[in-house]
Image (cartoon, rainbow, N blue to C red):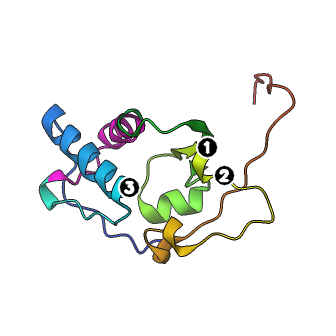
Amino acid sequence: PGKAIPCRRTTPLDAEESAQVVELIARGREDRHSVVLPEALQTRDWESVTKVALDLDQRLGWDPLGWKIGAASNEIRESEGLPGAAPGRIYRSTVFTSPARLGPELFINYRNVECEFAFRLAHDLLPRDE
């Protein structure tokens, strides 16, 4: 944590820039390669980042299974300069029953491999005051 180098831009992406970012990332995921965004398309504007994530989900059209929460702790958010927790989609094709052995073809980049633990709840959680 804390090793990320923030980009300079803090302004929002316009509609064309956002669409370009979505397409670059989608092609990287579909073709199984990492993507480095051109500096002109990088921003720290959180609304733009969130919009790209949601639009990417639509563009990929993959079968969603649920959500995960990244940067859940204050320590990580502060060290990475994030304004809040980062939602991320969990897709059906990326969920495996334990025990599972996953081949290298499933990974794009080993530098940041993380496992996620998912749970299926029997009942909805009711809202509470805290």
Is 96 placed above or below 88 here? below
Q: Is residue 115 left or right of residue 23?
A: right
User: Cβ–Cβ below 8 Å for labels 3 and 2?
Assistant: no
Instruction: Work out whether 111 lies above or below 9.
Output: below
Label 1 close to label 3 by CB (< 8 Å): no
Magenta stretch? 41-57
Reading the image, the residue beneath label 3 is: 29
> Given the image, on which type of amino acid does mark 1 rest?
Arg
The location of residue 96, given as percent across then percent down, is: 70, 56
Tag 2–tag 1 contact (CB < 8 Å): yes
CA neighbours of label 1 inside 10 A, class few (<14), some (14 to 19), many (20+): few
Q: CA distance from mark 3 to mark 2?
A: 16 Å
Q: Is residue 68 left or right of residue 84?
A: right
- Label 3: few (<14), some (14–19) or many (≥20) C-alpha neighbours in 10 Å: some
Q: Secondary structure at mark 2?
A: loop
Q: CA distance from mark 2 to mark 1?
A: 6 Å
> Residue at 82% of width from left, 35% of height from top?
121
Amino acid found under the numbered disc labelled 3: Arg
Dot placed on the residue nearer the N-terminal end, 3 or 2: 3
Secondary structure state at the residue bearing disc 1: helix
Residue that carries the numbered disc 2 in the rendered image: 95
Place of residue 94 in the rendered image (x, y in percent of width and height, measured from the top left): 60, 52
Number of residue marks: 3
Residue receiving disc 1: 92
In the rendered image, which quarter is residue 114 located in?
bottom right
Q: Amino acid at mark 2?
A: Val
User: In this orientation, which residue lies closer to the viewer: 118 or 2?
Assistant: 118
Taking the magenta stretch, the answer to whether it contains residue 77 is no
